[in-house]
Amino acid sequence: MNVANATLNDKETLNLLAQCAKETSALTRLECYDKILSPNSKTPLQNEGVPQHSALWFSIVEQEKTRKEDSPYFILNTSNNDSQILLTTYAIGLQPPRPILAFSCIDNITRMQIVLFNPINYKNTELQLITENDVVKANWFVRDNGFIFESSRGLLGIEQIKRIVNARSLTLKSDDPMLNGLVFNVSTLNSSIKVLRNACHW
């Protein structure tokens, strides 16, 4: 529908679009528009009823939907018994839905992940984590049908996090074009990750 040329018959649609505009989260707002303007179209999140994503993928994406507009800092979420702690932020300079940088402590295992909305093709690939003071080279792994790219778990992953924890920004360098050049504001990571570090005992 062309909103500018909408007729009186489109009044209900226009009212729904106005409700979408009130959403504070850019990701939620975009999904709202898509559901109204393209109700029968398939999104990357749908595949004829076949689940593409893990529960963790959905938890991270839902957490980012709570983000207030233009607040490029980390969102921290903890479960009632601290069995799952999520720390997330989004790639800056892109339109939503944007890749998400996520740190988690789940069942005492630390994870660092990039959550994607389109799957990557490479099974495993070297990734460079570039900050203003360091370059971390590591082999990361594809999870969740290509929608999550993950560092080594446990001690190796923790060492990578420690090398970026005091940085202001994090840039990714990869052979995969979906990952290459992603930039994240990590200026508050050192303070934001303290709860996660305590929960995972490092």
Image (spheres, rainbow, N blue to C red):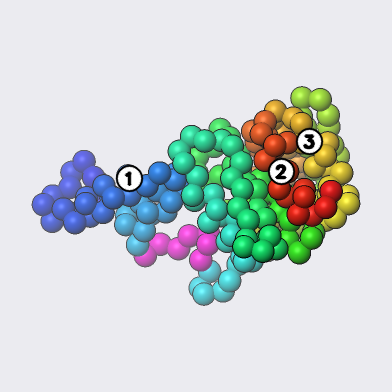
**Position of residue 186 in the picture relative to residue 31 (left or right):** right
User: Where does residue 89 sit, x and y in percent of width and height?
Assistant: 61, 43
Q: What amino acid is found at the position of numbered circle 1 in the picture?
A: Lys
Farthest residue toward the left?
8
Q: Of helix, strand and loop, which one carries label 3?
A: helix
| Picture quadrant where residue 126 is located | top right
Q: Give, as a single range, the part of the protein colored magenta.
A: 40-46
* Pointer 2 local density, CA inside 10 Å: few below 14, some 14–19, many at least 20: some
Q: Position of residue 106 (x, y in %)?
A: 73, 61
Tell me which corner region of the image, top left, top right, bottom left or bottom right, holds residue 73. Answer: top right
For marks 2 and 1, give the CA distance.
31 Å
Residue 37 appears left or right of 139: left
Q: Is residue 102 visible?
A: yes
Q: CA distance from mark 3 to mark 1?
A: 36 Å
Residue receiving disc 1: 22
Depicted 1 relative to depicted 46: above or below? above
Q: Is residue 150 visible?
A: no
Report the residue at 81% width, 25% height from top: 133
| Secondary structure found at label 2 | loop
Is 135 inside the magenta-drawn segment? no
Single out the residue that lies furthest toward the bottom.
49
Which numbered disc covers residue 193?
A: 2
Q: Nearer the viewer, mark 2 or mark 1?
A: 2
At a point 37% along the width and 54% down the height, the residue shown is 32
Is the magenta region chiefly helix, strand or loop? Answer: loop
Q: Is residue 70 above or below residue 119?
A: above
Q: Amino acid at mark 2?
A: Ile
Closer to the chain start, of discs 2 and 3, is: 3
| Other residues around mark 1 within 10 Å, as few (<14) / some (14–19) / many (≥20) | few
Residue under label 3: 164
Amino acid type indicated by mark 3: Ile
